[in-house]
Image (tube, rainbow, N blue to C red):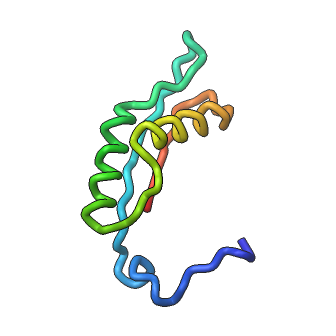
């Protein structure tokens, strides 16, 4: 946290511009996994919003889906989760 830096000229700091999605992941005890609800659709909207605001996201839709799925799997949670990607 000590190394985190946000420029005072950052537009989002002053005006709240940015994009985000709220994504549910539901734990399935029977299958022992978390199922992420409509991940592809959420991340498509995130990419679409980033293009509109001219925010460069250096990842493809497939890469983002893989990153989110991988992080959720590695998190070790065995309960419902809420995923909040933002840019």
Determine whether, in the image, residue 85 is placed left or right of residue 42: right
Determine whether, in the image, residue 29 is placed left or right of residue 35: right
Direction left: furthest residue: 52
Q: Position of residue 2 (x, y in %)?
A: 74, 76
Seen at 68% across and 32% down, the residue is 76
Quadrant for residue 15, please give it.
bottom left
Q: Position of residue 71 (x, y in %)?
A: 60, 39
Direction top: furthest residue: 30
Q: Position of residue 49 (x, y in %)?
A: 29, 58
Query: Viewer-proximal residue, 50 or 30?
Result: 50
Q: Position of residue 80 (x, y in %)?
A: 52, 32
Q: How many marks?
A: 0
Image position of 55 with respect to 13: above or below = above
Seen at 43% across and 58% down, the residue is 57
Query: Viewer-proximal residue, 36 or 65?
Result: 65
Determine whether, in the image, residue 38 is placed left or right of residue 74: left
Image position of 59 with respect to 65: above or below = below
Image position of 63 with respect to 46: above or below = above
Direction bottom: furthest residue: 8
Query: Viewer-proximal residue, 57 or 71?
Result: 57
Direction right: furthest residue: 2
Seen at 53% across and 26% down, the residue is 34
- Which quadrant is home to the C terminus? bottom left
- Which quadrant is home to the N terminus? bottom right
């Amino acid at each position: 946290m000590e190394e985190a830096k946000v420029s005072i000229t950052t537009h989002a700091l002053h005006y709240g511009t940015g994009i985000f999605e709220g994504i549910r992941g539901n734990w399935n005890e029977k299958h022992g996994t978390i199922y992420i609800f409509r991940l592809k659709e959420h991340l498509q909207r995130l990419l679409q919003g980033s293009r509109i605001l001219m925010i460069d996201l250096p990842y493809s839709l497939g890469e983002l889906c893989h990153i989110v799925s991988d992080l959720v799997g590695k998190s070790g949670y065995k309960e419902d989760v809420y995923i909040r990607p933002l840019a």
